[in-house]
Image (cartoon, helix red, strand yellow):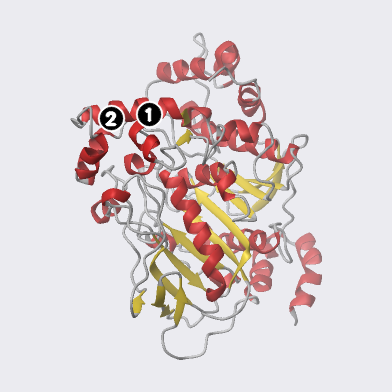
């Protein structure tokens, strides 16, 4: 039976038995597997800087090139400078191992990345299903999460691209500067800069990586005119920020944000950033004169002691002429198709119920009484019973801080005339009792392993769901629309019906609408108010 016959039968199969849905989907989608690469030597190609040698993948369906420099090491006098062009090397550079993660403190969840982290971190990995050919596959560029202070790209095995590229895309996984090394502003840095700007170095790294993709990806079989940026948590926030920067215009054509949205509190003015930088320098014992020479002489680990209070985005007049959140609320983000969503539970809010009440009063102001009733936290009430999907009040509040801003970003983008698709991911990694932040990542990358940061006892239903999610994500990268043959229809999003797709706790796929309606209505009212003077 041919693929076209299977697709034609799909509506009848679905109408007769929902239990046949996943096998039919997988059969349809599985036929798209690319043919094995011919046997031969590991591939060598030319990129900016010189020749590199990658590795053929063991399954024979592609190759990987790791640890490719896309800028000079940002060390010494290049610490807190925009990424500088790669210096050419002689001979053929081995591209077998990923570059190190960016410098970061040990936070518990990132211990391995922190121990391997280095200031010399501006590297990327390329996974290609076709090897070095003149093909034109869509390109997906991954931006890792970690609150812009921690995490890793290629160093993290969760982002192994073997499965994802089986859907006919080229995957690029990047590193970028984090924390005080990536987002530090200071008046001396502003004076030194030819753009009279400081801060935003981590975002400039991401832009430099996208420029490298534009200039080099065709040699890996990728289409430089069809690039999707996607990221999770801080990576998702950075995706949305990139959509608000004039420097990234034209470097990507689609965007996916998973579990992260912008907030005005993430942005500081150039003056505020410089003041925070002076305070940080003072903590480190910086002299009044010659601060930069002193700060650049310090070991990276010492700088981490003064990292508190560093915000990720600075309105420097260059990378961000205006606050990214305000660019979005005005409908001025780059006009590219967008997929955006979150998990049913991300993080429970920390602290006591009184702490949560206080946070709600800060967030909602005159709407706080309504919010407290809605979350079951009014002073004269007992906390409401836990919701079977969204958890108790702490779960709901902590997760709505991720979810509702993402919904509203989708509304802003849709109202500006751009295609938007929204989703919610509810599936817990078995045997975990509930979904959590990052639970979606094994499914997106197809790496459902027993061990690792997102390891679990994955079942057939999980593998089926992963295949479906990868099809949606890569269809979007190919066409700007996640829908495709053999998949349940994912309705487009608008601010009126607010339709979205749910990946359910039972590993099913179903459309829904008005995600967390009355809760997100409160966020909507606050976020759509005119901004206060800044």
Q: Position of residue 85 (x, y in %)?
A: 42, 60
Say which residue label 2 marks: 280
Query: Dot 2: what SS?
Result: helix
Does residue 494 sit above or below 431 in this rendering?
Answer: above
Please report the residue visible at 44 percent of the width from the left and 37 percent of the height from the top: 197
Q: Position of residue 118 (x, y in %)?
A: 27, 54
Rendering quarter of residue 306: top left
Residue 164 visible in this rendered orientation of the protein: no
Please report the residue visible at 45 percent of the width from the left and 91 percent of the height from the top: 40
Rendering quarter of residue 483: bottom right
Considering depth in this image, is 74 or 464 the residue closer to the camera? 74
Does residue 400 sit above or below 482 in this rendering?
Answer: above
Query: Dot 1: what SS?
Result: helix
**Going by the image, does 185 lie left or right of 62?**
left
Q: Rate crowding at label 2 as few (under 14), some (14 to 19) or many (20 or more) other CA atoms within 10 Å.
A: many
On the rendered image, what quadrant is the N terminus found in? Answer: bottom right
Residue 271 visible in this rendered orientation of the protein: yes
Q: Earlier in the sequence, mark 2 or mark 1?
A: 1
Q: Which mark is residue 191?
A: none
**Going by the image, does 488 lie left or right of 193?**
right
Q: Position of residue 520 (x, y in %)?
A: 63, 29
In front: mark 2 or mark 1?
Answer: 1
Counting labels gives: 2
């Amino acid at each position: 039976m041919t693929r076209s016959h299977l697709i034609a039968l799909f509506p009848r199969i679905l109408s007769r038995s929902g239990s046949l849905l996943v096998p039919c989907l997988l059969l349809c989608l599985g036929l798209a597997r690319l043919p094995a690469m011919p046997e031969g030597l590991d591939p060598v190609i030319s990129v900016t800087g010189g020749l590199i040698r990658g590795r053929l993948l063991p399954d024979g369906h592609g190759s990987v090139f790791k640890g490719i420099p896309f800028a000079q090491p940002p060390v010494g006098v290049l610490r807190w400078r925009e990424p500088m062009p790669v210096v050419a090397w002689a001979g053929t550079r081995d591209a077998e191992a990923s570059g190190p993660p960016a410098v970061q403190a040990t936070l518990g969840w990132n211990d391995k990345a922190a121990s391997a982290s280095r200031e010399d971190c501006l590297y990327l990995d390329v996974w290609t299903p076709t090897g070095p050919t003149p093909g034109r596959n869509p390109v997906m560029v991954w931006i890792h999460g970690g609150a812009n202070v921690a995490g890793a790209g290629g160093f993290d095995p969760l982002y192994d691209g073997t499965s994802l590229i089986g859907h006919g895309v080229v995957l690029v996984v990047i590193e970028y500067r984090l924390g005080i090394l990536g987002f530090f502003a200071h008046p001396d840095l502003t004076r030194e800069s030819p753009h009279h700007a400081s801060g935003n170095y981590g975002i400039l790294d991401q832009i430099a990586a996208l420029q490298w993709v534009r200039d080099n990806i065709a040699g890996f079989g990728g289409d430089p005119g069809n690039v999707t940026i996607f990221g999770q948590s801080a990576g998702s926030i950075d995706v949305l920020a990139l959509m608000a920067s004039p420097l990234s215009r034209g470097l990507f054509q689609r965007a996916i944000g998973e579990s992260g949205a912008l907030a005005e509190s993430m942005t500081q003015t150039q003056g505020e950033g410089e003041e925070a930088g002076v305070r940080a320098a003072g903590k480190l014992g910086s002299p009044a004169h010659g601060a930069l020479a002193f700060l650049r002489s310090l070991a990276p680990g010492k700088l981490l002691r003064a990292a508190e209070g560093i915000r990720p985005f600075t309105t420097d007049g260059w990378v961000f002429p205006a606050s990214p959140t305000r660019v979005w609320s005005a409908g001025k983000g780059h006009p590219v198709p967008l997929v955006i969503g979150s998990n049913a539970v991300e993080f429970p809010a920390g602290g006591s119920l009184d702490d949560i009440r206080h946070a709600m009063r800060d967030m909602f102001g005159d709407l706080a009484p309504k919010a407290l009733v809605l979350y079951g936290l009014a002073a004269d009430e007992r906390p409401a019973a836990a919701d079977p999907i969204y958890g108790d009040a702490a779960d709901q509040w902590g997760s709505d801080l991720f979810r509702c801003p993402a919904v509203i970003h989708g509304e802003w983008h849709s109202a500006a005339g751009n295609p938007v698709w929204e989703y919610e991911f509810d599936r817990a990694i078995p045997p975990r009792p509930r979904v959590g932040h990052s639970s979606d990542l094994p499914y997106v990358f197809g790496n459902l392993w027993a061990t690792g940061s997102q390891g679990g006892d994955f079942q057939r239903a999980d593998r089926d769901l992963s295949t479906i999610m990868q099809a949606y994500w890569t269809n979007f990268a190919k066409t700007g629309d996640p829908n495709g043959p053999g998949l349940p229809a994912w309705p487009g999003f608008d601010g009126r019906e607010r339709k979205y797709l749910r990946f359910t706790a039972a590993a099913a796929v179903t459309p829904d609408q008005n995600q967390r309606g009355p809760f997100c209505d409160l966020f909507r009212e606050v976020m759509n108010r005119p901004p206060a003077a800044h």
